[in-house]
Image (cartoon, grey):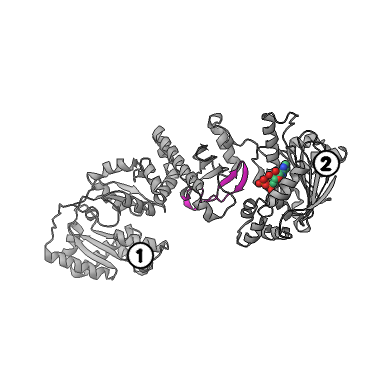
Amino acid sequence: MQEKGSISIHTENIFPIIKKFLYSDNEIFLRELVSNAVDAVQKIKRLSSLGQYNGSLGAPLVEVAFDKEAKTITISDNGLGMTAEEIKKYINQIAFSGAEEFVEKFKDAKDAHELIGKFGLGFYSAFMVADQVEIQTLSYQEGAQPARWICDGSTEFEITEGSRTERGTSIILHVNGDSEEFLDKYKLQGILDKYCRFLPVPIKFGTKTEYDYEDTAVEEPVEGEEAKSKDPKEIELDNIINDTTPIWTKAPSELKDEDYLKFYSELYPMSEPPLFWIHLNVDYPFNLTGVLYFPKVKNEFELQRNKIKLFSRQVFITDEVKDIVPDFLMLLHGVIDSPDIPLNVSRSFLQADSNVKKINSHISKKVADKLAELFKNDRKAYEEKWSDIGMFVKYGMISEDKFYDRAKDFALFTNTKQEHFTLSEYKEKAQTLQTDKDGTIIYLYTTDPAKQDSFIQSANRKMYDVLLMNSPIDSHFIHTIERKLEKTNLKRVDADVVEKLIAKDEKIESILNEEQTTSVKTIFEQAISKPNMNVKVEALGPDELPVTVTMDEFMRRMKDMAAMGGGGMGFYGSLPDTYNVSVNSNHKLVSRILAADAVDQGTLAKQAFDLAMLSQGLLTGADLTEFVNRSVSLI
Ligand code: ADP
Ligand code: MG
């Protein structure tokens, strides 16, 4: 039997095009060929279970081997094999049915994945690394003859009688001069680890294949140090490189916590154990399995995106899961496996794909369900984990309204006393004392409990509660909360003197008359003598501080945003820091200053102002030096 023919495409020599455009991603030839081998093994299993094949199956196996001297890489399987007719049908024609379209569109293609899948070029990706590709195959069908196909990268191919004696297929790549890097144990091992680590059929990796052993004498030493003293069977055992049943393919009921933790440490060897995980298992309206982990992160700067691996039927595809996983969950780790995600199409298509949208919202819902369950089942444990979980939840609430609605029942506020409240519990707590005269509830918060301590103490004296909002995400979270909660405002605890933070109707009487008030103002203005310090004399409780320096909430937020590089905030960024200096007319010290002689008035006012600045860490440089010198002389 010998037949020569032409691969049925209308364009001469498509291979140079493939090589050129797929070059950067050429390692995926191995993924494609091993996937085909795995498919072939699974097909024969299915045929057997359907009673359409009655021969013995043997242990399912795919083998990848390379021979440095012969410059070959061989991918063999004991799958269903092909007859010569099938080769013509599946390899020569079908695979290239999209070739014309391919040539027309290749200019727009962005990466190899896109081309390979879209045009059914899986098998032909072999030509990215080989200048000659050979198929040796024997079909499972009764009376089938072994067949051999060989093609040198032109459109000419040749089919002759093959030499295979056992059912299955071997693809032999005669590696081209530019691709000799692939004739390396570590290189191939690395690619197999990346794409084939969880394939459902055992994959053996070595320097020669079982198929070769039949051809050559078993006694012949096998290349590679370890292998030398062992017989082929042992090598087979040693070199299975994949886990055929990774945990996401199993039912959650079969798995223990240890299994999840072990899998996590296999995927992310140096990481701390995860906080918890979610086992995804959907079969309608789309197919999706996977395990997502909430990583333990020490700080936000450590957050790593692209830690979720996307698989399709256990074949690794990518760790760029953007668009498939909701943006705020990109911080999660783990795996997702779905045959329903169109893997080989452009990003914009992916975003519009309805399955992708469903998957996206399903994942978001599952995560919310899991959190709700943790919260409900063991609130204490949940609260203990809140400092880690909170970041995800807040991020989710900020970025997705739907998630906000689900999360509002298990999102927590933490106050300076480390007590936790749900949003509704907190409203309950705050509304009695912290509602202002217009009926707006004011939530007070601190971004830095140490620096803002004197303000926190003032608030606590009034029985006001102060929330901790000290992570970078909180400034965004505050905006979301204000947008979502009715008649609720958040104010940083140092945004004003305590009496004014939450404006009430009751008014504290000043012990100073109008004339005295004016002269206190003048004394302080002259003593401070800084244009960005806006002095006000106000009647506060006698226990409150004599002088308080504050920055208006709105002003401060604008400045914060400008500092963070917020768009359009340049104007606020360019303003000098403007502060309000509130002088408490009811404080003893203020009466004393008023009663002092002219020289002392200035010194004492300056001293009281500097103390206020000092308590907030605002006193620096020459002002600080001057303060120290003045304090020494006052002592
Ligand atoms: P796809 O895998 O998407 O069908 P490929 O180009 O990878 O496209 O393969 C084309 C066809 O060639 C396969 O559908 C299959 O029928 C056949 N084929 C490829 N490799 C093998 C193999 N190892 N064993 C049996 N058939 C194979
Ligand atoms: Mg394929």
Residue 192, quarter of the rendered image? top right
Q: Is residue 119 magenta?
A: no
| Magenta-highlighted residues | 300-327
Residue 543 image position (x, y, % from top left): 21, 52
Does mark 2 have its CB less than 8 Å from ligand 1?
Answer: no
At 12% from the left edge and 66% from the top edge, which residue is drawn?
A: 515
Amino acid tagged 2 = Asp
Q: Nearer the viewer, mark 2 or mark 1?
A: 2
Residue 551, quarter of the rendered image? bottom left
Alpha carbon of mark 2 to alpha carbon of mark 1: how far? Answer: 83 Å
Callout 1 secondary element: helix
Question: Neighbour class for label 2 at 10 Å: few (<14), some, many (≥20)?
Answer: few
Q: Is residue 324 magenta?
A: yes
Q: In this figure, which residue is indicated by the disc labeled 2?
A: 212
* Position above or below: 504 against 528: above
Callout 2 secondary element: helix
Q: In this figure, which residue is indicated by the disc labeled 1?
A: 624
In this view, the residue in front, 609 or 467, is 467
**Taking 46 as reference, is 282 left or right?**
left
* Position above or below: 141 against 28: above
**Taking 272 as reference, is 56 left or right?**
right
Mark before the other along the chain sequence, 2 or 1: 2
